[in-house]
């Protein structure tokens, strides 16, 4: 897509069966109606900073999409925007979204929503019975909406000062006891929560 575009028009990629991944360029502020509707092979979508709205049924029926991160700029998620994305497990809403349309995430049975405490996203999740994880919840170091052994490995690397990958974690993300200091006690708390011995 050309860098000069500011919006993706209605049904632009609708039903593209072979589309597996897309990186939407910077400058796009609006994804219109049904843009990626029923792109059944779509597995990865990277949205740009500056995106403001996601239109009606934009990603409906993208059955292989497993996670998506909505940037801080997004204020509106349209009706049925992600409905019937049956593999969708995690939506991270970094923005202070002001509007989430009716049925935006219907029939996404494995879904968890991650966002800020007290946000519209949290209210929406509670109203719809969707599990909610607060972004300030310690322990989810790899951002996959759950605390697993991979998070424990990352915490161990933080404790031993092992080199980290690009996008280094903040120590506060691993502070399980909220005492402001990262220690072996934090790792022990995580391992106990995971049912492991420490």
Image (tube, grey):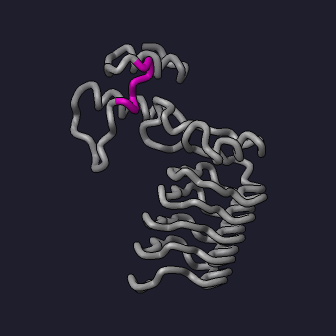
Q: Who's the residue at 51% across and 31% down the image?
A: 137
> Total number of numbered labels?
0
Q: Which of 65 and 6 is in front in this view?
A: 6
Q: Is residue 152 left or right of residue 168?
A: right
The quarter of the displayed image where residue 40 is located = bottom right
Task: Tell me if residue 177 comes above or below residue 124 in the rendering.
Answer: above
Residue 186 on image: x %, y %: 40, 19
Residue 21 on image: x %, y %: 50, 71
Q: Nearer the viewer, residue 90 or 72?
A: 72
Q: Who's the residue at 58% across and 69% down the image?
A: 42
Q: Does the magenta stretch include residue 176?
A: yes
The quarter of the displayed image where residue 122 is located = top right
Q: Is residue 96 magenta?
A: no
Q: Who's the residue at 38% across and 14% down the image?
A: 185
| Quarter of the figure with the N terminus | bottom left
| Quarter of the figure with the C terminus | top left
Q: Who's the residue at 65% across and 47% down the image?
A: 120
Residue 83 on image: x %, y %: 73, 61
Q: Which of 168 and 53 is in front in this view?
A: 53
Q: In this view, does 192 lie to the left or right of 17?
A: left
Question: Which residue ends up furthest to the front in the rendered image?
Answer: 98
Q: Find the magenta span and give its range.
A: 172-178
Task: Tell me if residue 137 comes above or below residue 51 in the rendering.
Answer: above
Residue 85 on image: x %, y %: 69, 61
């Amino acid at each position: 897509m050309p860098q000069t575009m500011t919006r993706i028009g209605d049904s632009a990629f609708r039903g593209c069966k072979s589309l597996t991944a897309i990186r939407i360029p910077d400058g796009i502020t609006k994804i219109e109606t049904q843009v990626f509707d029923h792109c059944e092979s779509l597995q990865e979508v990277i949205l740009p900073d500056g995106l403001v709205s996601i239109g009606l049924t934009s990603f409906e029926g993208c059955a292989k999409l497993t996670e998506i991160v909505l940037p801080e700029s997004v204020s509106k998620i349209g009706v049925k925007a992600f409905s019937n994305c049956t593999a969708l497990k995690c939506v991270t809403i970094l923005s202070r979204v002001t509007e989430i349309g009716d049925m935006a995430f219907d029939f996404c049975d494995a879904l968890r929503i991650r966002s800020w405490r007290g946000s519209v996203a949290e209210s929406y999740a509670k109203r719809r019975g969707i599990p909610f994880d607060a972004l300030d919840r310690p322990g989810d170091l790899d951002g996959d909406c759950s605390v697993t052994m991979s998070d424990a490995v990352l915490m161990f690397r933080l404790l031993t000062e092992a080199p980290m990958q690009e996008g280094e974690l903040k120590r506060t993300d691993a502070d399980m006891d909220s005492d402001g200091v990262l220690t072996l006690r934090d790792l022990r708390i995580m391992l106990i929560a995971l049912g492991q011995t420490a």
